[in-house]
Image: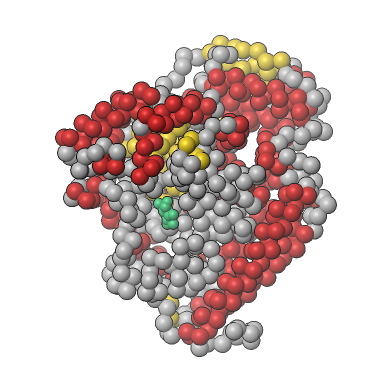
Amino acid sequence: MKNYADLWLGYSEKKNNRDCKALRNIRLSGAPESDKVVINAVNELKTGLKTMLGFEPEITFGPSSAPVNATNGKEILDSEEYKISLADDAVSVEAKSGSGILYAAFDILRTIACEKDFAKTYSEIRTVRPSNPLRMLNHWDNMDGSIERGYSGESFFYENNEIVINDRTREYARLIASVGINGVVINNVNVKQAASYMITDRYFAKLAELGEIFAGYGIRLFLSLNYASTIEIGGMDSADPLDEGVISWWKDKMAEVFKKIPALGGFLVKADSEGRPGPFTYGRTQADGANMLADIVKEYGGIIIWRCFVYNCRQDWRDRKTDRARAGYDNFMPMDGDYHDNVILQIKNGPMDFQIREPVSPLLGGLRKTNQMLEVQIAQEYTGHQIDVCYLIPEFKEILGFKTYCSEDNDTVEDIISGRAFGSRYSGIAAVTNTGNDFNWTGNYLAGANLFGFGRLAFDTGLSAEQIAEEFVRMTISEDDRVVSVILSILLPSREIYERYTSPLGIGWMVNPGVHYGCSVDGYEYDRWGTYHRADHLGIGVDRTDKGTGYAFQYNEPNASIYNSPEKCPDELVLFFHHLPYTHVLHSGKTVIQHIYDTHFEGYEEVLEMAGKWDSLKGEIDDGIFGNVKERFGRQIDNAHEWCDQVNSYFFRKSGIADEKGRQIW
Ligand code: GCW
């Protein structure tokens, strides 16, 4: 039986490339043999080739360049670039750092693992430069071992308020480095009291060790920080960013922290949000808070990643003028240009909170003078809890390709976060991760495609969702063409299928309060009035136009006018921007109500079909993987059924309009 915990590094014997002479001699240049990342790369090549092709390559070393101390995104990209060229009897890898060599090693191994013809693949010199300087995973792991929004077991970083370092830690570093991740935040952004102590003596030794393990795979360690640490652990009564006492406490603290954890990259901060402390308490701006910390960590090469998820979770949703969607832009735009150059604003992909469909946050394309990172979520909080299959890479592709019209050219989200659009000092992309200590890391085995896919896409945004899914299936499940095509036909449409049986036309939410799995049309916990969707007997949707909350005008033109008009607004977002009668006719030619009925019935049917396809793989793939996903399909079917019933009957009762196809709605 396959050890499916190895995911895409579970190499097995391969048929192709056994005669490729060149692979017996691999020459690495650009970083010294003694570099610990190079040592890991060499081990990977040796063991990978031995397992897959039956021989160990001879590895030799060419000249190495001076070590790089990258202090901006461009230097990071320069140092991570690699070149692979092929002669008759040798493969040659050139890079400027151990990371470049490691990524080249995984490039070679992936080609062999996918049974691609090696000589053909590298017949032309391959030069690869990552698309984004920072490619990060954010863990929402708590010190007690629980994971906020974790759906695949407990944390493998923490247990009973202690940091755990074991084989799994190293395996994790290998796994994520192999897809190009170069930064990890190991603790939850909700830094509660116990976790504040992460930056105290109690944890320094373990953090230093962890930082070193990560560094061996080109990954930088980051920590989430409690903004009010001066109060939580410093015994002070203020966290005012302009207070001299506060500043001097932080100076001493950071000097200690960076000395004790030399590999530390910096901090991620959630401030003034959902009960977390922040500068607003002292009448200061988000920029005041971020800059104060950034100025202090600068001398250690540290960066401050400051989240833009700042909104009032106690808002009264009955109030028609307050609009949570506006909050990110309203709180952060006015200070564009004020954030110091080692501050990065981390922006959730949508203005709300990782719903199955949201418009792209208007901060992306709004901010022009600020370092930016995009934040996505592969932990399936609102997208099926790693019970339901929901391959998210097609969604991420849409987000990256979104035209913001922030400039004449180079105006997509991809252009902004790569640093191209504005020449930002730092930029990149982060995902709230979906891993835990479950044997297979991600709960549903197919959710591994999101972990793999996020890394691959962050590294190379030019890859298609299909290419990535295919690599995942070939590397982890099977190389049989039929199996590959069946699994692709499950993964690729799965996000749109999930959308069809859940919340319609961009309205969002409709989830069980607190847990966020399963349907409850009026249920979202922060809206105890059940009114956010504005559904009454005549219509549904939130008016975010110039006549409503005005949110549509946070976008550049022509996006603002497109979203502002019910005629021009794309169907999939129309209820996000407009309050419409159930009888409004969409571009699809259907009325809103008929769209709701049809998509819900279809979505449920499609889940049955997906489950049937999976069943057809019995005996053709590993039993463990088969059983793991089959069990979850059972639950996904129930979930889709429940959503379909609840949503359809809710809107049938509200609107009193019958399904034109005469299907039974309870
Ligand atoms: O919507 C919320 C999630 C919280 C999470 C928060 C955030 C870590 O439900 O669990 O807290 O988003 O992104 O900070």
The residue shown at (60%, 72%) is 642
Which of the 4 image quadrants contains residue 499? bottom right
Q: Quadrant of ligand 1?
A: bottom left
Indicate the position of residue 542 as horizontal and vertical percent values: 38, 71
Look at 43% across and 67% down and name the residue there.
524
Residue at the far left: name it.
244
Q: Say which quarter of the image contains residue 293.
A: top left
Looking at the image, residue 32 sits to the left or right of residue 546; the answer is: right
Residue at image location 73% in from the left, 26% down from the top: 49
**307 or 516: nearer the viewer:** 516
**Residue that sits furthest to the top in the current view:** 63
Expressed as whole percent of the image width and height from the top left, the position of residue 555 reads 35, 57
Q: Give coordinates of residue 522: x percent, y percent.
A: 45, 73
**Residue 283 in picture, x, y percent from top left:** 18, 50
Q: In this view of the protein, can residue 292 be seen by the observer? A: yes
Q: Where 627 falls versus 79 (above or below)?
A: below
